[in-house]
Amino acid sequence: MSDAYASVAKGKLKLKVDSELKKKKKKKNKNKDKDHEKEALQKSYAEQQLNETPQPSGSYERKLTKAELATKKQQEKMRNKRIMDKAQTTHKQRVEKFNEHLDTLTEHFDIPKVSWTK
């Protein structure tokens, strides 16, 4: 069995550290840097020219249709009605109303007993 484990590395595992993994730095071509700077200047100049030309009404704003406006108004109306109804009744009144509702339900909805001792 010692032959099966002959090629196994013994000892602690080593973690790789950034200092050990130094990457070679690429040499920069000065001419390419100058070319990039020229292109950037040309792009910025072109953008300035576009910005100076008058544009119609800035950004596009979506307008709601009549049906969408009607549904929004109706939803707001219903929400306000619901809020007013809740605000008019106290917590005690709501609990009493809920208990009355539970009393009207049939035995089918009762919670069954779990223990047979009582």
Image: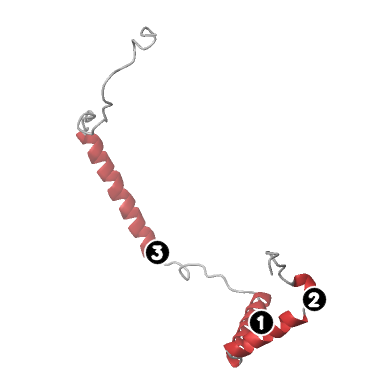
Q: Please, what is the three-letter code of the amino acid marked with disc 3?
A: Thr
Judge depth for marks 3 and 1 and give the one in front.
1
- Distance from disc 2 to disc 1, alpha carbons, whole Å, reads 36 Å
Residue bearing mark 3: 53
Residue bearing mark 2: 106
Q: Please, what is the three-letter code of the amino acid marked with disc 1?
A: Gln
Judge depth for marks 2 and 3 and give the one in front.
2
Write down the quadrant of residue 73 in the picture.
Answer: bottom right
Using the image, tell me which numbered label, if any, was put on residue 74. 1
* Mark count: 3
Does residue 97 appear to the left or right of 35 in the view shown?
right
Image vertical order of residue 109 relative to residue 23, above or below: below
Q: Is residue 105 visible?
A: yes
Q: Residue furthest bottom?
A: 88
Residue 32 spot, x, y in % from top left:
25, 36
Q: Earlier in the sequence, mark 3 or mark 1?
A: 3
